[in-house]
Image: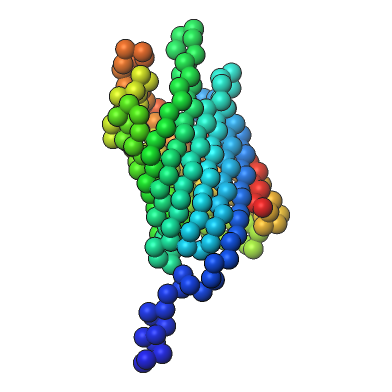
Amino acid sequence: DSSVQESQSHDHRKEHGAQVYAVSTLDTQWQVNDHAEGVLKSKLQTRIGTDENKLFVKIHSDKQESQATEYDAKLLYSRMISDFWDVQAGVRYRHEVNQQEHQTDREDKFDAVFGLHGLAPYFFETDAYFYLGEDQCAALSLETTRDLLLTQKLIAQPYLDVDVILQDDAKYAKKTGLNRAAVGVEMRYEISKNIMPYISAGYEYTKGDQHTAWQSATDSEQSGLYAIGLRFRF
């Protein structure tokens, strides 16, 4: 009984000491929707640190056809609070491009970021963030995935991405509430643990833009999403 109690109270965070490690993932995909609109999406994530304290760098970029590239970057400090969860805090930089009739308006903004990173029950890998920034911006985001091994190399990965706008007083504000939701499944083949081509199919809902002095309101849209991509881990 004493050995069982000792095992249950053991702090696993101290098992690996202060060893520093680094992992980076580069993901590039070509995505199209039901309207034959294409976008090149790229993601780079790097984490470096110990089991207890890590630094995350996350960069996303979207390049739609015939439009300038939009991108955002997060710099996050991550602190382990349990065997499966980290609490995170940091800053996000956004470069947004707004196409209005015959002109293009580019904006650069910064947000404070607070969130959780880890494994939800049943091994759903989860990132949940709260953003607070310029123009009275307050927003939430949730990304969650789960790996289902069909073979040792062929893996199905259902995913869910949700963005919620709590408040936005920007020139090109998004409508408040559930602003975007995407759900689908990715099928990847792991040539090795470092090279992983994949295809994916899903569904996306977007609520649209608010009416402001600089833009007209837009209607919500629904569409299928189809992508082919390549992921590197090193």
**Residue 199, position as x, y percentages in the image:** 61, 43
Give me the residue at 52% from left, 31% from top: 71
**Residue 232, position as x, y percentages in the image:** 66, 48
**Residue 64, position as x, y percentages in the image:** 56, 25
**Residue 100, position as x, y percentages in the image:** 44, 12
Give me the residue at 57% from left, 40% from top: 43
Residue furthest toward the right? 191
* Residue 146 in view in this figure: no
Indicate left or right for 107 with 174 as reference: right
Asked if 217 appears above or below 13 in the picture, the reply is above
Front-lying residue, 133 or 64: 133
Residue 138 image-quadrant placement: top left
Residue furthest toward the front? 18
Indicate left or right for 116 with 227 as reference: left
Residue 226 image-quadrant placement: top right
Give me the residue at 43% from left, 61% from top: 80
Q: Please, which colouring scheme is shown?
A: rainbow
* Residue 136 in view in this figure: yes
Quadrant of the image containing the N terminus? bottom left
Front-lying residue, 188 or 29: 29
- The number of numbered discs placed on residues in the rendered structure image is 0
Residue furthest toward the bottom? 1
Front-lying residue, 200 or 6: 6
Give me the residue at 43% from left, 58% from top: 79
Front-lying residue, 136 or 180: 136
Asked if 85 appears above or below 69 in the picture, the reply is below
